[in-house]
Image (cartoon, rainbow, N blue to C red):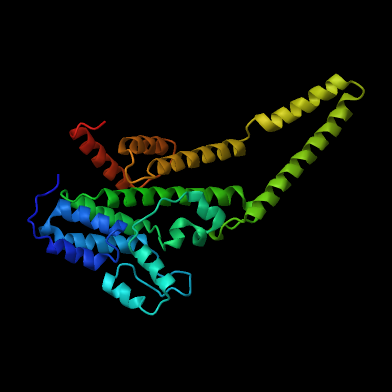
Amino acid sequence: MLTEQPNDRQWEDEILNVHTLNRNSQVAKAARELCASGGSDKRDLINELLREARHAFHRYRPADQKVPELRFGASADEIKAAISDCPRETANKIIDAYGTLWLHEVPDVILYDGYENSVIGKRYLNCDVSLIESVAHTYLADHSLRSPTLEWAIINSLLYAETAAYMETLSTWTSTLSGFNSAHGISRWKLWIFSAARLSAEIAKLGVTALFSAWIGGDDRIVEALVFLSITAARWFVPTQKKRQTLAAASLASGMEKVHRLAKNITFNARAVREAAYGATRSGAIFSDYIFHLLDRRVREADSNGVF
């Protein structure tokens, strides 16, 4: 429920001036939502929340040497002063990043292409779970504040963090022999070489199986065929302990990625995301409690408003 405010919105403009360099940015949208729901008596809390949010969602030392070392928790005036000597292209890039809370990114993009080549990397976004949870705690502590934009950023980023971390662990576990380094991205050509090596190894195994089957069968082609098919079927279709673990882990990663994908847009269906998230946790996924706190509140509000 939005609080009625007096016509004088000077205090809201002051907040926007402190926290935004672009009035059409995500941060500006979140600021307006917080001001409309909280009212002028919450201006200090709103200022704190926006400052914490920018600090939590961004990297502070971009790898690009042309970009100055920035703390995105700084005010708009401090950022303008820091980039005053930067080339226009660099300055515009920083202004764009400063106004961005979060962007949806497919988790395995980081694994394959590296952070610098990802959507979030180009906006200097950084998912610091502990800081984002602190933002969520501050936001949820005041029951009058509402910002769908900030809520989405918290939920999507925390889902991303848990999913990406698990997928990186899974990638490291399943690709140890290939020498991949997930932290710096997995080169496409390495994947092709690895796939070709796996195929060559399988062809070699089939050759050995054929020779063994011919030795067992002798001149009896039926016995030879039965031995070959039995060994190959057992190798391909009878799950070993390692195969079962790999399949279970891959299934869990797929379930976590599905939850994150359902929360792709700011107008996501909270009920669908919540059901998928609870389903993933029953399979072994671990998500931040703040995700469920925010989703539960959204579902309760939807129920109270008759939205199903």
Measuring from the top left, give residue 44's x and y in whole percent: 16, 63
Q: Position of residue 8 (x, y in %)?
A: 9, 60
The answer to whether residue 297 is seen in the rendering is yes
Q: Residue at x 32, y 64 (%)?
A: 55
- Residue 304 lies left or right of residue 130; in this view the side is left
In the depicted structure, whether residue 85 falls above or below residue 148: below
Residue at the far right in the pictured view: 219
- Residue drawn at x 29%, y 66% is 21
Q: Nearer the viewer, residue 176 or 140?
A: 140
Q: Position of residue 272 (x, y in %)?
A: 35, 35
Left or right of 152 in this view: 201: right
- Residue 182: image x %, image y %? 56, 56
Depicted 128 relative to depicted 166: above or below? below
Q: How many discs mark residues in the rendered view?
A: 0
Where is the C terminus found, in terms of image quarters? top left
Which quadrant, please, contains the N terminus? top left
Residue 141 appears left or right of 57: left
**In the rendered view, would you say 228 is above or below 15?**
above
Farthest left residue?
6
Q: Is 302 placed above or below 109 here? A: above
Q: Residue at x 35, y 38 (%)?
A: 273
Q: In terms of image quadrants, where is residue 207?
A: top right
Name, please, the residue furthest toward the bottom. Answer: 85
Residue nearest the observer in this picture, 84 or 162: 84
Residue under the point 76% across and 44% down: 200
Q: Is residue 198 left or right of residue 31?
A: right
Can residue 75 be seen in this snapshot?
Answer: no
